[in-house]
Amino acid sequence: MSPYDVFLVIVALGLFGAIVLPRRLAGKPLSLPIVYVALGAVLFTVVPGAPAVDPVATPAATERLAELVVIVALMGAGLKIDRPFGLAGWASTWRLLAVAMPVTITLTALLGWGVLGLLPATAVLLGAVLAPTDPVLASDVEAGAPLTEVEEERAPENRWGSVRFSLTSEAGLNDGLAFPFTYLAIALAAATGPAATGGWRWLAEWALVDVGYRIAVGVLAGYAIGVLMARLVFGSPAPSRRAEVMAGAEALATTLLAYGLTELVGGYGFLAVFVAALALRRYEWTHEYHRELHDFAAIVERLLMAAVLVLFGGAVAGGLLAPLTPAGVAVALAILLVVRPLSGLLAFAGSDAPLADRAAVSWFGIRGVGSFYYLSFALAHASFTEIELLVAAERLWAVVGLVVLASIVLHGITASPAMAAIDRRRHGDPDPGPDPDDR
């Protein structure tokens, strides 16, 4: 069997799974990502002629595939949010970004440096790679489709933000804000490598360009493109029957436009896509067409997610985790079971959030495709002067791969029962019914 035949089988199974499995798995302690990873492991083990999947050897290809699925997921996440943007209404998000994310990066970097023996730049990279909550794999704990909680999110008693809103908004923003720390790792490696010129000029350049300029451009470009696309979408006449076939495709066009244009001018495309989605969602707030936009993005996201996770399963079966040491396993589990929960609880210290909600948000720091992207990006863009990043590539991929695999299993098993219990408590309904996304 040729690699092309294997590819066709993967596409077919991905399509079937994206259509059928969400309904079959709704309410069960099992998630779609678990099924896809297991399927990939089986396919690439038993199918004759299946090609080897090695993200370490192909960082550029891995980067592009992960990049595509993440930006589509960011658009979907932004369109889900029914809460108007603001400082007070997004207090839970700001806490997670200002406290949980830096604490996660710091503790992870310390584990990498102190336990794994990584050099400082490589340890910082590990922290940056494993900091973001992934918008691709977090769909089971994210907000539902647009217009499902508009009135509820405006209610004064929900001012702190629900679990679903907190995780959705966190995943949307911190997936872009991890970029400055990735650049910090690359800059630190260059500053301490064999071709280093000494001095602290690199730190000032990082603060001004990678933090200040790139974030500002990402926010401004995303907002401008989102508003422009919103006016085009909602200011146009009602679509004809022929145009209805492509209903919602504007979401994908906005995603690619926001990402591409922002990257062209040196901004953070991930951040621009999420901001564009928020601007698009804010326009004609209660318009039913927001559901079409979200549903189209969700379909594309599920297909891309299937491809990435099946390939990830193949990589695991092909030996991606082979370089793991007992220390690597301990660090990976500590990141999931200690670092993220602790960081989340610290973020909500002193808030009025219910204890159960704090615990849920802290636990569901899901790691996934975004981590693949940041790691492959750093390795693909490191020159010979950042040799310390390159020599650790296999070890880094093994640790990151185990964190993602464990997150897929642990969070996938606990997501449905945990979120069902939270929804019942929040709504006072003994049977919340199916998730709107699964219909």
Image (cartoon, helix red, strand yellow):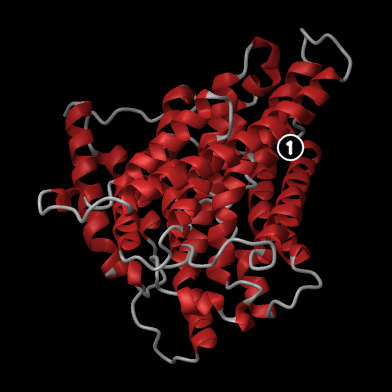
Give the residue drawn at x 80%, y 42%: 110
Residue 432 percent location from the top left of the image: 40, 84
Outermost left residue: 241
Element under label 1? loop
Q: Answer left or right for 85 relative to 279.
A: right
- Label 1: how many Cα within 10 Å (few below 14, some 14–19, many 20+): some
Give the residue drawn at x 69%, y 29%: 210
Determine if residue 160 is in view.
yes
The answer to whether residue 345 is above or below residue 278 is below
Label tally: 1
The answer to which of 14 and 142 lies nearer the viewer is 142
Q: Amino acid at mark 1?
A: Leu
Q: Quadrant of the C terminus?
A: bottom left
Give the residue drawn at x 72%, y 56%: 100
The answer to whether residue 117 is above or below residue 12 is above
Residue 427 percent location from the top left of the image: 49, 87
The answer to which of 334 and 145 lies nearer the viewer is 145
Q: What residue did someone put label 1 on?
A: 116
Residue 103 percent location from the top left of the image: 77, 51
Residue 79 percent location from the top left of the image: 43, 57
Q: Quadrant of the N terminus?
A: top left
